[in-house]
Image (tube, grey):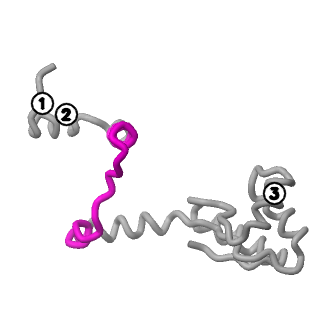
Amino acid sequence: MAKLTTDELINAFKELTLIELSEFVKAFEETFEVTAAAPAAVAAPAAAGAEAVVEEEKDEFDVVLEAAGEKKIQVIKEVRALTSLGLKEAKDLVDAAPKAVLEGVNKEAAEKAKATLEGAGATVTLK
């Protein structure tokens, strides 16, 4: 197999769809055990692009259970309702607080989950 030049590789990447490119990056990271994340200093000068990235990051939230409170059983029931966990798994999650209940959910779902858990007596933060 002939060694490809940088220009040839870039031209090959231009022909890929975003999904194909994303799959390539994942496979590259797994194969070489590296992370393809850009350093923060490099991303800062791209003002318009950086704003889009920041807004994109704000679309996903983690719902973190900080403490169960006094109504632990109610909190366990709400955790089970929000997730597909069984009783034991939900109890273990509540006992292990602070722990993420939901990860990578949209703002609306995160706020709804937070309100539900706080209604049951838990202390919750969104990250």
The spot of residue 29 in percent (x, y) is 36, 43
Label number found at residue 12: 2
Name the foreground residue: 97 vs 83. Answer: 97
**Residue 41 higher or lower than 35, as above or below:** below
Q: Residues within 10 Å of mark 2 (few under 14, many from 20)?
A: few
**Secondary-structure class at tag 3:** helix
Q: Amino acid at mark 2?
A: Ala
Q: Quadrant of the N terminus?
A: top left
The spot of residue 122 in percent (x, y) is 78, 77
Q: Residues within 10 Å of mark 1 (few under 14, many from 20)?
A: few
The spot of residue 78 in percent (x, y) is 82, 64
**Residue 21 higher or lower than 88, as above or below:** above
**Secondary-structure class at tag 2:** helix
Please tell me which of labels 1 and 3 falls first in the chain.
1
Residue at x 79% of width, y 60% of height:
92
Q: Nearer the viewer, mark 1 or mark 3?
A: 1
Q: Marks 1 and 3: CB-CB under 8 Å?
A: no
Q: Residue placed farthest to the top in the image?
A: 1
Q: Amino acid at mark 3?
A: Arg
Residue at x 25% of width, y 72% of height:
44
The spot of residue 24 in percent (x, y) is 34, 37
Q: CA distance from mark 2 to mark 1?
A: 10 Å
Q: Is residue 32 magenta?
A: yes
User: Which residue does the numbered mark 1 point to in the structure image?
Assistant: 4
Label number found at residue 77: none
- What span is in magenta? 21-48
User: Which residue does the numbered mark 3 point to in the structure image?
Assistant: 80
